[in-house]
Amino acid sequence: MELCFVVGSMAISGGTYVIIQHASYLRARGHNVTLAVQEPFTTETLAWHDEAPKLRCLPIDEAKKQPFDLVIATWWKTVFELGNFDSRRYGYFVQSIESRFYPISERPLRALVDATYNFPIEYVTEATWIQQHLKDSFGQHADLVRNGIRKDVYSINGPTIEARPAGKQPRVLVEGHFGVSFKNTALGVRLAREAGAKDIWLLTGSPISWIPGISRVFSRVPMVKTAEIYRSCDILIKLSTVEGMFGPPLELFHCGGTAIVFDVSGHDEYILDGSNAIVVKTGNVDGVVKALKQLLTNSEELLRLQDEALKTAEKWPSWPEASVLFENWVEKCMSAPPVNKAKLIDLTTNAFSEYSTAEEDRLSNNPGIVRRHKLSALAAKLPSSFKLRIKQLEAVGEVIFGGRVVR
């Protein structure tokens, strides 16, 4: 079949990683797979994932000129593009309820995102909680295809960056982007330091090279190299407050470590508190510090959690096992009733009309928001080298001045 995934960006992220895995499997199965990408990309953009350079990636406007059997939206902005594609069928791969990415104060934007879950197309998702939310809140049935794991990359055996410290305090890894409030990466760094961790590493997709209190910073690391970092660390701190089914704790499980996480949606797909990791109620920063202090000083408890985490990893399906279910969903889409493309265009037009009216009202009552928007637009025009410096300063600022606030 001629298949197309409509993708926001090919830059390093967990969501893009999952799309690449499914797309690569479908390509290997003999389907012609295209990734229609909204943001500009280069060969360097694709280099972080070993399978990405093998895929047919096109700018979205170029992809719109070609016919497909199935076009799959992969995040909320791409749903509004579906009506611009010539396709026999349309689908939506929902990796999170993305209206939760934005603050409650941005009600018009959150409503715009939620409008995408009303489109009369085929749905598939990666987590049980998303499947249930789509059914309860929007009356949509979504097939469930949990994410797999690259067993060829993530395993307990293999090279390390540096051996785990034997007979010394365990090494802590903090993972996540900066500048994304709900990732709480800077908070993870601060709480690790507060707990008394002496050797803290950082793995991030943000373009930074130094963070105060961090022994080693790994920025924009190729996917196949991340396992070397995981094998070098004992405990992962991952404090996201919005997730679909997040991958880093599971990847670390495969490499012999354990994790401390908030009870974020999706964690229960594979994490069991007190069994293979420690789950802290979201927002309980004292609980995070207490849990980490325990693991830093109680080697028996740490080893018990790591052993159970490895058992969880051994039972988890590989990517081929997961992607065969995704292919089953693709085939199911082709037997579904066709959707009138004009209906998709009408839904898009109506959603943006309602958003425009509501947003104009919000801005007219909050002049400070307009000023912030103008500053953001100005910053977007700065040279890339200058923007990288700003991101470095912003990340340092988040760690130094962020306090103990959960976003």
Image: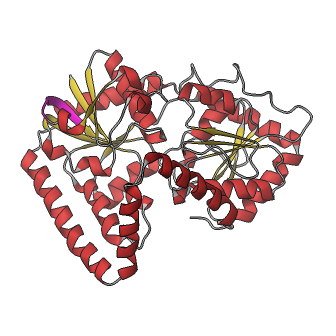
Position of residue 200 in the picture relative to residue 4 (left or right): right
Image location of residue 292, percent across then percent down:
78, 52
Residue sitting at the far bottom: 365
Image location of residue 375, percent across then percent down:
40, 67
Image location of residue 349, percent across then percent down:
14, 59
Image location of residue 46, percent across then percent down:
42, 29
Position of residue 336 in the picture relative to residue 269 (left or right): left
Q: Which of the two residues, 58 or 389, is positioned nearer the viewer here?
A: 389
In which image quadrant can residue 356 be found? bottom left
- Residue 324 seen anywhere in this rendered image of the structure: no
| Dominant SS type (magenta) | strand
Residue plotted at (13% across, 39% down): 337
Q: Quadrant of the N terminus?
A: top left
Position of residue 389 in the picture relative to residue 372 (left or right): right
**Which segment is the magenta one?**
65-71
In which image quadrant can residue 158 be found? top right
Residue plotted at (76% across, 51% down): 213
- 119 falls in the magenta region: no
Q: Which of the two residues, 241 or 173, is positioned nearer the viewer here?
A: 173
Total residue callouts: 0
- Residue 164 seen anywhere in this rendered image of the structure: yes
Q: Quadrant of the C terminus?
A: bottom right
